[in-house]
Image (cartoon, rainbow, N blue to C red):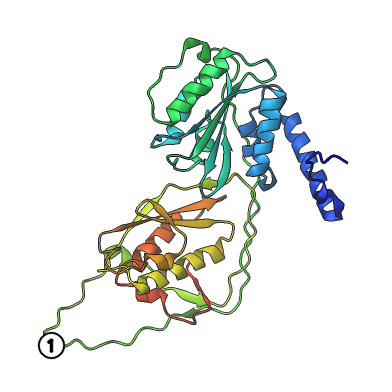
Amino acid sequence: MANDGTNLEILSTRSGFNSAVRQIKKTIGVVDAIGNTKNLGDTLFELGDEDLSGERAALLLRMILVDKMGYRTVSSNLKSVVAEPSALAGEFSKWKGVDLIVAYHHPEMGLLVANPKNAEELSGLGQLRKRELLVVYAGKGGAPADETCSTAAEIAASLFEGAKVKAPPALLRGNFAVKKLKKAAEAPEKAPKRGRKAVKAPKAPARGRARGRPRPPAPAPEAQRIAAPVVTASAPPVTAPKGPVKMTPRYAVVVQNELFHNGNVEAWKRIVASYKAKYPQLEVFIYYDGERILDINSLFKWGKVKHGSAIEFAVAGNDIKDVAKLQRYLAQGASNMFEAFLHGPVNNVLKLF
């Protein structure tokens, strides 16, 4: 018997069969929702369904936009990138002659889909990176695509690379205007149950100062305003809300200590663990010298991360919160006040957020 290459093993179990049926129903629902005028990026943004993201979103792009609607496509491994992708929405929103969808293969978050005419959706792509794949789809809904669509896809791809190109008049006339969107419903945040009061971190014993030894530098004013962390054995469970996955810009944290040594590293690890305990649906990405740091311990290299160096971080997920507070704690953890985060049992989580 010839092997047609179709993978049907998932249908051999009850859970796999039910999963496939649910995916088919969701796909049919997306097709019905789009019709001839609805943008696929807008539909996925409104649904905020994780089951329709990543590689499954890639299947929708191929099945709906290419096979069903015949959209024209232009792909590019970005040679250069525009600084603020969301700023392009103002230009794309004028293109009423075509329907546009952009798919960006983010190195950390996977495939992201957006309507480039919507600034909020474009901001969800985060900071574009060179040599990453970006694909632009252009069409006319239920009507056949034409050369105007090909031109639109080519110009759009070049704009994402920072080119200055003026759109032809044919792109400015039509019915594909920006529509107001309904955001995905978010789950209500439950108030934590009352229990025992958290134990304050014990103060470190005062040390005498040797004669003639200079005093340590005074802490930064921002660090002085940060409350002392408390310790909790476990964090209350948090229900992850539905919604579109986004990524914040990269925020820089300047190292105020003489060197970013193992004490600073441990402080950062405990701060990030505390943030993840409060917001398990969010992910914290750390970068140094333009590269993503997978293990914070790797930042502990004598003579490399010195005073004045900048370590960057970004937060990804939906319903992103407390980024400013996270930045303040990380700034303190990168200073000579890092010891405040090292008190308490090793296996317990700091209650900072």
Foreground pick, 342 / 306:
306
Q: Nearer the viewer, residue 151 or 263?
A: 151
Taking 281 as reference, is 206 above or below it? Answer: below
314 left or right of 257?
right
Return the residue found at the far left: 212
x, y percent for residue 309: 28, 58
Residue 178 appearing in the image: yes
Q: Residue at x 40, y 66 (%)?
A: 298
Q: Residues within 10 Å of mark 1 (few under 14, many from 20)?
A: few
Tell me if residue 322 can be seen.
no
Counting the numbered discs, the total is 1
Q: Position of residue 134 (x, y in %)?
A: 52, 34
Residue 141 falls in which quadrant of the image?
Answer: top right
Q: How far from the left and from the top, in percent, is residue 85?
A: 44, 35
Residue placed under numbered mark 1 in the picture: 211
**Which residue does the image show at 13% across and 88% down from the upper left?**
211
Direction from residue 141 to residue 343 in the image, left or right: left
In the image, residue 349 sits, relative to residue 13, either above or below, namely below
Residue 7 position, x and y percent, is 79, 45
Tag 1, which secondary structure? loop
Q: Quadrant of the N terminus?
A: top right
Q: Residue at x 63, y 22 (%)?
A: 71
Q: Quadrant of residue 73?
A: top right
* Residue type indicated by callout 1: Arg
| Residue that sits furthest to the front in the current view | 1
Return the residue nearer the eye: 311 or 181. Answer: 311
Hey, which quadrant is residue 47 in on the image? top right
